[in-house]
């Protein structure tokens, strides 16, 4: 009879195995047992049951003519016997588990992973016991990063304090994929509402960072300080305490584009004015040009002046970019002259050097080039509409007007121009479109 017994594992709330509402026990292999852990189940049983006790078999897996493997499986049995029991929130019992057959069985599985075991212990055990468990199990920083969640904030704080886990580990793990270039490199980067949409930073990890540092001393790591400043600025939270004297914080210029989109000019002004914040432009091609362009389009003349001062003045190309964007957005000649001493011919020559099509010129804010391209020839209606949409998406009101005058439709794409104006808060463009009788629509 004993030869027919199957060995498995079972989780329960008590020192004896528990049945479900159908009077059946759930039995699993070591590999899958903690996938099914439920709050309050503090006992792990090593059990045995006869094969004929199996009432139901459940599996999530892949099977074909070549291979067969499971991501999860369990059986429901009508009787089983507990051979050994471990109390997962008890120090002695927990440590005995690490030396037991369970670990051997877990290690012998095809896709061995102890993450669900560790995550369960972190949740069940108090902070002190969890720390001792981490020491006893000799968990690596990589394993900790996979298993720690927002629920384990206090444990994370203790690990950072004890040195078992460091800010460097945090940066090389969860923060390793943060790429400031992504924030500034893409044409539509200013459209993003959240850091995670730009950087792949999850809401859960943002919450964890805030829990770790919002009421604690600032991070020691430069990257973490920058992330905390960026998160706080975006969410309108206090941020000055993350900046310490003589330790500059380097933020991507694309963050300013994001703050523009979020209508937070006060935060942008604080960035421009703070002596220990440095904006990094070289991480993405033309990122400074993009910043100047967006400030011009949104008509933030004070912020343009602050940026001008922070840079020690615009160079020739920056001055041309500024004049080009201000003109395309509909700024007055007086407002344009306040930042530039650039001749119109210089702007046109710069735009002509791009060798752009009408649609490309419209999307880049090259008003003078668009006029030149339309000067001696009649553009096709489809080309005019495509160019008008590109200009509307970027907020270049004067180019939209120009293209409309030449036959471009303000209802192109399903009335997208007015939808773009509302989505990206282009007030000058919206005013013009409403004056032309457009309905106030959103996406």
Image (cartoon, rainbow, N blue to C red):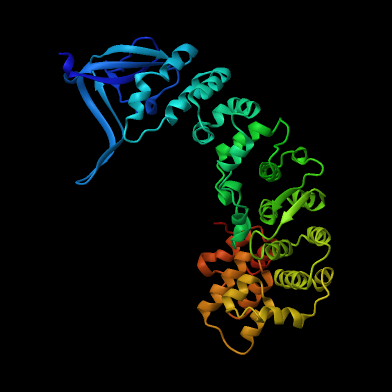
Residue 311, placed above or below residue 160:
below
Which sits in the foreground, 102 or 330?
102
Which sits in the foreground, 391 or 93?
93
x and y, in percent, of residue 112 in the image: 37, 33
Q: Residue furthest bottom?
A: 376
Q: Residue furthest top?
A: 15
Residue 174, placed above or below residue 153:
below
Is residue 12 something one can see in this rendering? yes
Q: Is residue 416 left or right of residue 395?
A: left
Q: Residue at x 70, y 38 (%)?
A: 220
Q: Quadrant of the N terminus?
A: top left
Q: Residue at x 32, y 31 (%)?
A: 109
x and y, in percent, of residue 426 in the image: 67, 61
Q: Quadrant of residue 62?
A: top left
Which sits in the foreground, 362 or 284?
284
Q: Quadrant of the C terminus?
A: bottom right
């Amino acid at each position: 009879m004993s030869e027919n017994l199957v060995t498995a594992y079972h989780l329960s709330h008590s020192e004896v195995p528990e049945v479900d509402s159908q009077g059946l026990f759930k039995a699993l292999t070591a590999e899958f047992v903690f996938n099914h852990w439920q709050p309050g189940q503090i006992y792990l049983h090593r059990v045995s049951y006869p094969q004929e006790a199996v009432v139901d078999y459940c599996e999530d897996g892949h099977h074909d003519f070549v291979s067969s493997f499971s991501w999860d499986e369990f059986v429901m049995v009508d009787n089983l016997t507990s051979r050994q029991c471990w109390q997962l929130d008890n120090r002695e019992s927990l440590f005995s588990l690490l030396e037991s057959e369970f670990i051997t069985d877990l290690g012998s599985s095809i896709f061995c992973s102890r993450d669900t075991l560790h995550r369960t212990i972190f949740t069940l055990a108090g902070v002190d016991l969890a720390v001792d468990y981490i020491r006893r199990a000799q968990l690596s920083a990589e394993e900790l990063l996979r298993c720690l969640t927002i629920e384990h904030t206090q444990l994370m704080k203790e690990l950072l304090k004890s040195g078992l886990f460091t800010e460097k580990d945090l940066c090389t793990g969860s923060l390793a994929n943060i790429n400031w270039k992504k924030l500034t490199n893409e044409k539509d980067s200013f459209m993003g509402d959240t850091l995670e949409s730009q950087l792949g930073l999850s809401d859960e990890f943002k919450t964890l960072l805030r829990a770790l540092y919002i009421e604690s001393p600032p991070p020691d790591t430069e990257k973490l300080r920058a992330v905390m400043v960026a998160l706080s600025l975006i969410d309108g939270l206090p941020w000055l305490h993350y900046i310490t004297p003589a330790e500059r914080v380097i933020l991507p210029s694309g963050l300013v584009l994001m703050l523009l989109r979020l209508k937070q000019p006060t935060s942008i002004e604080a960035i421009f004015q703070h002596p220990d914040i440095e904006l990094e432009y070289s991480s993405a091609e033309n990122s400074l040009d993009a910043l100047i362009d967006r400030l011009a389009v949104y008509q933030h003349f004070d912020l343009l002046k602050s940026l001008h001062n922070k840079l020690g003045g615009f160079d020739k190309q920056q001055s041309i970019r500024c004049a080009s964007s201000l003109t395309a957005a509909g700024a007055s000649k007086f407002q344009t002259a306040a930042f530039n001493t650039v001749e119109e011919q210089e702007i046109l020559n710069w735009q002509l050097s791009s060798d752009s099509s009408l649609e490309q010129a419209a999307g880049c804010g090259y008003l003078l080039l668009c006029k030149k391209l339309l000067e001696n020839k009649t553009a096709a209606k489809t080309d005019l509409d495509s160019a008008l949409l590109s200009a509307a998406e970027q907020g270049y009101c004067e180019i939209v007007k120009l293209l409309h005058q030449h036959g471009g439709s303000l209802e192109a794409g399903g009335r997208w121009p007015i939808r773009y104006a509302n989505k990206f808060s282009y007030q000058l463009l919206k005013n013009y479109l409403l004056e032309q009788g457009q309905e106030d629509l959103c996406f």
